[in-house]
Amino acid sequence: QVQLVESGGGLVQPGGSLRLSCAASGVDFSRTRMGWYRQGSGKRRELVAAIFSGGGTTYPDSVRGRFTISRDNAKNMIFLQMNSLKSEDTAVYYCNAGVGEPDARWGQGTQVTVSS
C-alpha cells in the first residue's frame, strides 16, 4: 500500500521560506520519479517540481530559482525548499509518486499560506 505523508506547511510572510517534506512507503522509491504539485483556490493543480531517479530535476518558470526539490533515497523522502515566497505561492501542496504516470499516487496535501 502506497503512503505519502507531507509535512512542513504553514503561514509565512512574503519573502520568507518554508521546507516541505514527504515520507513515502510502499513504493520502489529509488526508481520512482517523485514530485510536488500545488493547487490554489479556484485553480488547476500544477506541477511545481519533479526529481527523477537519477537526480535530475525540473521546474516551471514560475518557481525556478526559488524552489529546490531534493530526495533522500536512504530515508524514502523528498523535500521542497521554497524561498522568496510570494502570495501567489499560496496553495495546497501535494507530494506525488510517479510523476506523469497513469497510476501516480498522491499525498493528502499540506497548506502553504503566504501572507503578511
Image: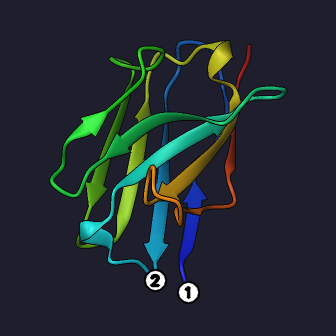
The vertical placement of 89 against 101, above or below, is: above
Around disc 1, counting alpha carbons within 10 Å, would you say few (fewer than 14), some (14 to 19), or many (20 or more)? few
Around disc 2, counting alpha carbons within 10 Å, would you say few (fewer than 14), some (14 to 19), or many (20 or more)? few
Q: Is residue 91 left or right of residue 80?
A: right
Describe the element under mark 2 as helix, strand or loop.
Answer: loop
The residue type indicated by label 1 comes to: Gln
The residue type indicated by label 2 comes to: Gly
Residue furthest to the right: 42
Residue name at image x 43 percent, y 60 percent: 98
Residue furthest to the left: 54
Residue furthest to the front: 102
Residue name at image x 56 percent, y 41 percent: 37
Are the residues at dot 1 and dot 2 in contact (C-beta closer than 8 Å)?
yes
Name the residue nearer the viewer: 63 or 42: 42
Q: Which residue is mark 1?
A: 1
The vertical placement of 36 against 78, above or below, is: above
Residue 38: percent from left, percent from top: 62, 37
Q: Which residue is mark 2?
A: 26
The vertical placement of 75 against 88, above or below, is: below
Residue name at image x 72 percent, y 31 percent: 44
Residue 46: percent from left, percent from top: 59, 33
The C terminus lies in quadrant: top right
The N terminus lies in quadrant: bottom right
Residue furthest to the bottom: 1
Q: Earlier in the sequence, mark 1 or mark 2?
A: 1
| Residue 67 - label | none
Describe the element under mark 1 as helix, strand or loop.
Answer: loop
Query: How far separated are the C-alphas under marks 1 and 2?
Result: 5 Å
Q: Is residue 5 left or right of residue 19?
A: right
- Dividing the picture into quadrants, the one containing residue 63 is top left
The vertical placement of 104 against 27, above or below, is: above
